Image (tube, grey):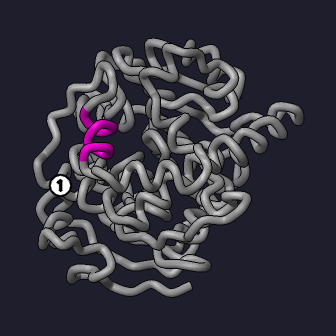
């Protein structure tokens, strides 16, 4: 594994519209250094800033590390903050399709993030994840308990609980959890007809979410998510959710395995998760020590309620 400085734009991440990812990072995440970390079979786009104990923050779909731009700068005085683009997203590598969708199991994605942190010199760290990133950090805490001292997850329930409890109302609100799992090539071809509309529907159309996006961040999300390889990756990642992640959860449940570290669970009370699931009861079954932070917003907590989220994260992460 190698690490290279990436102070300029990354050609693989630039878009036809001329968006310069490095310039957007400099504007929205001042003080962070851009790095390209070669992790196993591909490159992970990584930003590092601040000083203090290490803190890894993982974004959701269809977004990038920029989703933390209203939160991460306020943590830099207390932590060495690491932001990455998950595999398949942003400027990170995008494995192709496979019969078992294994490249996008949260187990594989979590192990990749452990490798990134190890080669930054961090053997044990705190974790924060939103949406898809929350699924990865949850799996990381289960599979690598010795690596994690604190865990915060935002607006998810585990894959097994989600699919076990799904009904017609949930399917209506979270339609893409079922659409994206369909066999290749149906979702890929249908999204390709108007990828901008599809990704905007997720970013702006979820019930309860009124997200005051910074225009630069929104443009970056759309530019990254509407590329052909990114569309293929998001489909594979959701297929892995129902084909692989559910099975891993079943194995953990059967073994009585729980998250060992202190855990903080956020959710938006007005969003799909908050309205359709008993979030606290579900997470109590998966954790040994949990605190709960419902917020009066929708799904995109880091951009809908960044001040409240930051305040609660600081209190939780500094409670030693």
- Compared to residue 69, the image places residue 115 above or below, namely below
Residue 50 appears in view = no
Name the foreground residue: 134 vs 10.
10
Name the foreground residue: 203 vs 75.
203
Q: Could you tell me residue 83's position as x and y percent?
A: 38, 60
Q: Does the magenta stretch include residue 200?
A: yes
Secondary structure predominantly adopted by residues drawn in magenta: helix
Quadrant housing the N terminus:
bottom right
Q: Is residue 89 magenta?
A: no
Res. 24 image quadrant:
bottom left
Name the foreground residue: 180 vs 130.
180
Residue range in magenta is 197-204
- Compared to residue 288, the image places residue 49 above or below, namely below
Q: Is residue 81 left or right of residue 28?
A: right
Q: Residue at (33%, 85%) from the top-left corner?
A: 5
Q: Could you tell me residue 64's position as x and y percent?
A: 34, 56
Residue 189 appears in view = yes
- Compared to residue 182, the image places residue 23 above or below, namely below
Q: Is mark 1 on a helix, strand or loop?
A: helix
Q: Residue at (27%, 54%) from the top-left corner?
A: 221
- Graded by Cα atoms within 10 Å as few (under 14), some (14 to 19) or many (20 or more), the crowding at tag 1 reads some
Reading the image, the residue beneath label 1 is: 219
Name the foreground residue: 53 vs 186.
186
Q: Residue at (38%, 50%) from the top-left corner?
A: 191
Q: Residue at (33%, 79%) from the top-left corner?
A: 12
Q: Could you tell me residue 309's position as x and y percent?
A: 32, 32
Q: Could you tell me residue 89's position as x and y percent?
A: 41, 61
């Amino acid at each position: 594994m190698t690490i290279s400085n990436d102070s300029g734009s990354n050609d693989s991440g630039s878009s036809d519209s001329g968006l310069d990812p490095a310039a957007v990072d400099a504007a929205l995440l001042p003080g962070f250094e851009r790095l390209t970390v070669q992790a196993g079979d591909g490159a992970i786009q990584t930003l590092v800033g601040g000083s203090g104990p290490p803190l890894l923050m993982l974004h959701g779909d269809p977004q990038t590390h920029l989703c933390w731009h209203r939160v991460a700068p306020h943590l830099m005085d207390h932590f060495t903050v690491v932001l990455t683009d998950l595999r398949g997203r942003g400027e990170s590598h995008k494995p192709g399709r496979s019969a078992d969708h294994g490249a996008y199991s949260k187990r594989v994605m979590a192990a990749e993030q452990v490798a990134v942190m190890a080669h930054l010199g961090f053997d044990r760290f705190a974790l924060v994840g939103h949406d898809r990133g929350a699924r990865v950090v949850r799996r990381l805490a289960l599979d690598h308990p010795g690596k994690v001292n604190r865990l915060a997850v935002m607006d998810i329930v585990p894959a097994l609980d989600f699919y076990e409890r799904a009904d017609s109302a949930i399917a209506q609100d979270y339609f893409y959890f079922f659409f994206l799992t369909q066999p290749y090539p149906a979702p890929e071809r249908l999204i390709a007809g108007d990828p901008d509309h599809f990704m905007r529907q997720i970013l702006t159309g979820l019930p309860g979410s009124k997200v005051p996006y910074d225009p630069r961040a929104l443009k970056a999300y759309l530019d990254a998510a509407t590329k052909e390889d990114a569309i293929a990756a998001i489909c594979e990642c959701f297929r892995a959710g129902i084909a692989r992640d559910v099975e891993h959860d079943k194995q953990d449940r059967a073994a009585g395995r729980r998250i060992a570290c202190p855990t903080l669970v956020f959710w938006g009370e007005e969003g799909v998760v908050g309205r359709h699931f008993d979030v606290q009861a579900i997470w109590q079954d998966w954790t040994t020590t949990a605190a709960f932070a419902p917020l009066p917003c929708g799904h995109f907590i880091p951009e809908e309620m960044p001040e409240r989220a930051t305040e609660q994260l600081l209190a939780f992460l500094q409670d030693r």
